[in-house]
Amino acid sequence: MDLRNKIAIVTGASSGLGVSFSSKLIEKGVKVYGLARRLSKLQEIQSHLGDQFIPVEMDITLHEKIDQWVDSTFSEDHLPQILINNAGLGYFGNIEDLTIEEWNRMIQTNLNGVFYITRKTVPLMKLDEETSHILNIASVAGLIGNPQISGYNATKFGLRGFSEALFKELRYDKIKVTTLFPGSIATHFFDNAGGVDTHSNMLQPDDVANTLIHLLETPDNFLINEITMRPLNPKNPDEI
């Protein structure tokens, strides 16, 4: 895909990977609709990235709000070619300590939110004569289960299944679907992880974003439907 003058939707755009994704896309000439709940943070990001970044205050777990925004923003003359389902959260702990609220929030954000915006974006992508691309940001937790992240595992395993089915469903409509499975990334994601501190040996958001750009720029009839990324040495250098 030639990224110049393309239109992208990025969820979870107010921090971490979402900011890096938006920045790298804009460098390539893409207009980015950045979705997140914190409008003030999105506006701050716009002040750095410029008018190619369009802040959209949105809670992706509210499907009626998603429907209204998509219907009022896009048309046959203004189609999104890129959807990056990046918004996600995790709560870690033993199963008996995981609350119903925490479980439901993970399901709502990591699975339902992806479904809500994807179901509205796909019909628009089908109208486009050129190739479109949906990228779902999962985790290595979608490939292997581990203690104390059972709820997060469930959502990311679910996202993998959703993505694989979707890639097979949409491939003949010139819509690519790629799932990214990164290991630990140095972002605020670990704020809920119970004492896990970020460090320099974790994956860096800009490096993951550069990989995403590579995926988008592959030839139109070339698909990488899954990609796993890990730190070579995941240990905290201050503790070695």
Image (cartoon, rainbow, N blue to C red):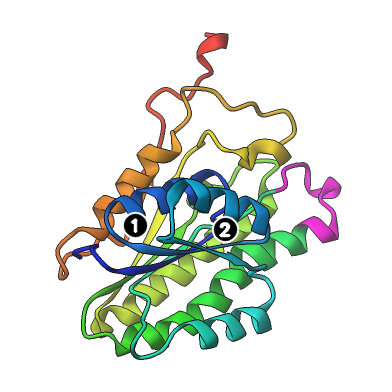
Q: CA distance from mark 1 to mark 2?
A: 18 Å
Is residue 139 in view?
no
Q: Residue at x 66, y 54 (%)?
A: 40
Which percent across, then down, holds residue 107?
68, 65
Q: Quadrant of the N terminus?
A: bottom left
Q: Residue at x 67, y 41 (%)?
A: 147
46 left or right, relative to 127: right
Is 92 contained in the magenta span?
yes
197 left or right, relative to 52: right
Which class describes the residues within 10 Å of circle 2: few (<14), some (14-19), or many (20+)? many
The number of numbered discs placed on residues in the rendered structure image is 2
- Residue occupied by mark 1: 226
Which percent across, then down, holds residue 192?
72, 41
Which percent across, then down, holds residue 114?
55, 70
- Residue occupied by mark 2: 87
Q: Amino acid at mark 1?
A: Glu
Q: Is residue 58 above or below residue 217?
A: below
